[in-house]
Image: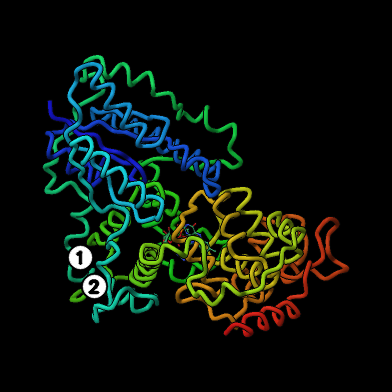
Amino acid sequence: MMYAIHWFRRDLRVATNPALAKSRARTGGKVLGLFCVDPQIVSRPDTGIDRFAFVLESVAALREELRTAGGDLLVLPGTPEEAFGRIFSECARHGSARPAIVSFNRDYEPFARDRDTRLTRLLEQENGVEVVTDRDHLVFEPGEITPQSGDGHYRVFSPFEKRWRAVFAEQRHRVPDRADNPGGRTPGIRFTWSDLPGTGRELQRHDVIDTTRDSVQPRVRVTLPPAGRVAAHRRLSEFLAGPIASYDEARDIPAVDGTSRLSIYLKVGSLTTAEIIAALDSPDRETARPGRAPGPQAPGIERFLTELIWREFYYHILYHQPRVEHEPFLTRYWRLQWDDDESRFDAWKAGLTGFPIVDAGMRQLKATGWMHNRVRMIVASFLTKDLHIDWRRGEAYFMDRLLDGDLAANNGGWQWAASTGCDPQPYFRIFNPERQSRRFDPDGEYIARWVPELAALDKKSRHAPPEDARPNGYPAPIVDHARERKVALERYRAIV
Ligand SMILES: Cc1cc2nc3c(=O)[nH]c(=O)nc-3n(C[C@H](O)[C@H](O)[C@H](O)COP(=O)(O)OP(=O)(O)OC[C@H]3O[C@@H](n4cnc5c(N)ncnc54)[C@H](O)[C@@H]3O)c2cc1C
């Protein structure tokens, strides 16, 4: 009996799943789903408990989706080597056929690339199983958006974006196809573990990972948003029905729910960029596409597309320069001097720095597992340029707390703020937290929401509470911004 195993990783959905569609087509729908709860990932310092719980909830939603489609998902504890080893030995013990194909969608993080190379060798060379892969979470993979000179890869965003858009314009018609099952002819899934006599039951017994909300929630520090494909699409529809129209302006105002909040779904693959683009491309949403008059939503759509391209850019950087996971992109900044002031770092994490916009952001992160992009930039700048604390410590804290924590974007965002990255914020442009606050949260609404002890102050005082109006318990600023700005400039200048 010819069947396939689709190994789900960060593509937690059945529909519009390219590698899964391939194995469905090749086997007439006889595909078993596998998800490994890999201790190497679970024990990584950058795997936050909340995000891990959200992944498990997304896995539970995926299992329901698979069951509804007529298939099933095996959730095995262990590394993929162990999981496949167990599957193969069960097959041998029961005289069942091994899978002829193992499919998965490609991943570009250094850890995943090493793992996938090892696994492919193990499956193909040692076990005679065909490995089928496809692109999934990026519209264009590393190597597809390259300078026309043919010289390596882009290091600056604007030319990358320009080239991305040019290639996209040529291939636009193919992008939705990539996300979809080719021609809609993919056979439905109609295969479960019990179709493998004996083997199925044995494997089920190893299926010890309980992914239900009750088992996951008790250890979680925040309220998780609803997981899964249906929830992701609901959020996309809500965003496209309203906020997208003013996204270009509202995206910078943290008090407004003006962004998509799709990052968390993109991270686990309940939804992909290609699918979002296909939805943006629907005829009632005219973009500034050649030959068509732009519709009223065009500025919002174009800006939104730019943000999605930033996501791709950082993945291309991580792929071509995997060293950035551990070191500054601009290597000269290895020599930058950082301070190890634990009490300041603790104040930053707790949202008790005495800088209201910084504190509001850090409290939003702690309470919800998400922080508005503008405020991510402010708090990251504050940590690195006002407190002079190494960006890697901030990056790690974000990975611990963020539900959308994603190596490429997080590393890119932190290195941008610390001015150590590719195409970074120039080191001499240092955010003034109070000025940022007055500009992007003019009425102090966001501050009042997350630092409620400041809500009673008049709107203009919320940005920098005067000493005599400072509520009990709210700290005085832990540093003098003007002074620390000079210190930062001296340290960066010493290197440049
Ligand atoms: C210091 C710092 C750390 C960050 N860490 C992460 C992270 O761990 N994971 C993450 O997904 N994003 C990260 N970002 C980028 C950005 O803040 C989030 O993607 C965004 O806030 C998510 O909310 P949203 O989905 O509503 O975004 P929207 O504004 O709706 O944007 C749509 C999508 O575009 C992508 N995007 C938007 N802005 C960026 C950006 N600057 N860089 C890369 N992709 C972007 C995201 O996939 C996002 O979901 C970080 C930014 C900074 C400055």
Is residue 233 in view from this perspective?
no
Q: Is residue 159 above or below residue 360?
A: below
Q: CA distance from mark 1 to mark 2?
A: 10 Å
Residue 233 pos. (x, y %)? 35, 47
Which residue is under mark 2? 289
Residue 415 pos. (x, y %)? 52, 69
Nearer to me, 125 or 312: 125
**Residue 203 appears in which quarter of the rendering?**
top left
Q: Total number of numbered labels?
A: 2
User: Which residue is at 24% across, 74% downward?
Assistant: 166
User: Which residue is at 13% across, 40% downward?
Assistant: 25
**Badge nearest the viewer, 1 or 2:** 1
User: Which residue is at 27% across, 19% downward?
Assistant: 200
Nearer to me, 487 or 417: 487
Horizontal side of 170 relative to 154 (left or right) equals: left
Q: Secondary structure at mark 2?
A: loop
Q: Is residue 136 above or below residue 53?
A: below
Callout 1 touching callout 2 (CB < 8 Å):
yes
Q: Which quadrant holds the N terminus?
A: top left
Question: Which disc is residue 172 wearing?
Answer: 1
User: Which residue is at 31% across, 32% downward?
Assistant: 84
- Give, as a three-letter code, the residue at label 2: Arg
Residue 130 pos. (x, y %)? 18, 40
